[in-house]
Amino acid sequence: MNATPSPHRDPALGTGQQLYQRARQRIPGGAQLLGKRPEQYLPGNWPAYYRRAEGCTVWDLDNRPYLDFTSNGIGTCLLGYADPTVNAAVTECIAQGNMCTLNSAAEVELADRLCAIHPWAEQVRYARTGGEAMAIAVRLARASTRRSTVAFCGYHGWSDWYLAANLGESDALAGHLLPGLDPAGVPRALQTSALPFRYNQIAELEKIVAEHPTGLAAIVMEPMRHEAPRDEFLQKVRALADRAGAVLIFDEITAGWRSNFGGIHLTLGVNPDIAVFAKALSNGFPMAAIIGRTAVMTMAQQSFVSSTYWTEAIGPTAAVATLQRMEQLNVWEHVHEIGTAVRTGWAAAAARQGLSIKVGGIPALCTLGFEAGEQSRALMTLFTQEMLARGYLTAGAFYPTYAHQLSLVADYLKNVEVVFAIMRQQLDAGSVLSALHGPVAQSGFARLT
C-alpha cells in the first residue's frame, strides 16, 4: 500500500483561509463557535468557510469538495446537509411568512409531538439555541425551588450559571468536555452556585447533596454521552434529586435522537423533570425545546422568560418535518451501523499500522484519540492534514448522519489506512512536527492573538 504523503492541496492559499484572516480582525475569536475555529483542526490550512453543503459533502469557497467525517454541523444535521424534505417544509414556511404578529400553529403541533414521544412531559417551551435553552431550564428550576445552587455533570454551554463553576477553581470544568473555559465577566457573587460532579461517580453527587441540607435547585447532566451509566447511576441520581427536592434536568442537546427516537433517557429507564433538545431536533435550522412536568414548566409564567425570535415559524416547522423524516427512516438504526463501521475500521487500521489509539463514545458519537504522549496532538493534526489532502474533513470526533453510506465509509477507511501508515513512518523517523504544514491544532478554549 502506498504510504507516500499526497500532494498538498494547500487551502492556505485558498479563499477560505484568506477570508478567515480578515475575520480574525473583525470577529473576536475568529468565529461565533469555538468548535468552528480552524485552529481547532488545522491552523493555517483548514478551509474555514463553505459555499455549499449537501448530504455529507461540503464545498469550500474555491468549490473544492470534501466528505465530512467530523461532527457534521457540530451535531446538528443528523439527516445530512440540506435534507430535501426538511428544506421543502422550510421553503414553504418562508413563502407564507416566517414571522407575524400572531403565533405559528407549528409550535403547538411540535409541542404535542414532543410530549407524545416523551409521555412523562406535559408542557413545552422553545428557544433557538442549546445554550439559551439550558439557561431557561436552570431558571425554571431555580424559580420552582426558590433555591440557587446547581449540581451538574457534563458540558452545558456558555451561560453564567455554568461558567460560574470556574470562579473558584479555574479548572473545575476541565473534566466536562471543554477545558480552559474562562469565566471572565461572570459575577463573582455566583461563586459556589454551580458545583461539578463526574459521570458514574455517584459518591461525588452524594457529597454535594450532604453539604447542602437545605436542598439544591437542580441537578443538571447529560444522561449519556461517551460512556454508559454503570451500577444504576441514573437511578441513583434520580433518587438523590427527589431526596434533595431538586429539579432533575437532562441535557439531551447532543445525545438526543441519535440512538433512538427521542431522548436517549428513554432507553435508559430514568425520566427527568426537564429535558432540553436542540442540535439534531431540526436538522440545522435554529430550534431548541425545553420539555417538562407542569409543576416546573409553569414557572415560565412567573419568571420572565420571553424573546421575540422564539416565535418565528421556521424553527418549529423544521423540527416537525425533521421528526417525521427521522421516524420514517429509522435514522438512529442507520447511524448506529455507520458509527460502528467507522469505529471498527479505526481500530483495525491502527492495529495493522502499529498505532496506539483510543476509540470512545457510542456509535452515534464516535471519538478518536492518538496515544503518543506529547506527540498526540501533533499526530491528530497530521491525521487531519493528510485526510484533508485526500478530500476528507476529519478530526477527533465523528457524528454519523443518514447521508453517510457504507460505500463511503469503505473508501474513507482505505484512506485512513494510508494516512495511518504515513503517521507510523513519521513517528518512527521522529519527524511528526516537521511533516506538518502549519502549527499543531489547539485543544479546548484558547485566546487567539
Image (cartoon, rainbow, N blue to C red):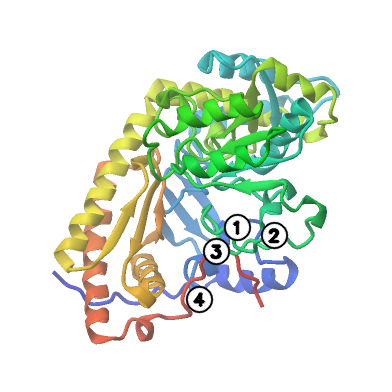
**Residue at x-position 34% and y-position 68%:** 383
Q: Nearer the viewer, mark 3 or mark 1?
A: 1
Amino acid type, residue under disc 1 in the picture: Ala
Local crowd size for mark 4, using a 10 Å CA cut-off: few (<14), some (14–19), many (≥20): some
Counting residues from the N terminus, which is met first, the one under dot 3 or under dot 2? 2
**Residue at x-position 78% and y-position 20%:** 103
CB-based contact (under 8 Å), mark 1 and mark 2: yes
> Which residue in the structure is indicated by mark 1?
172
CB-based contact (under 8 Å), mark 4 and mark 3: no
Counting residues from the N terminus, which is met first, the one under dot 2 or under dot 4? 4
In what element is the residue under mark 1?
loop
Say whether residue 329 is left or right of residue 262.
left
> Which residue in the structure is indicated by mark 2?
168
Vertical comparison of 293 with 170: above or below = above
Amino acid type, residue under disc 2 in the picture: Gly
In what element is the residue under mark 3?
loop
> Could you tell me residue 249's position as x and y percent?
60, 31
Residue 445 found in image quarter: bottom right
Of residues 379 and 151, the one drawn nearer to the viewer in this rendering: 151
Residue 17 found in image quarter: bottom right
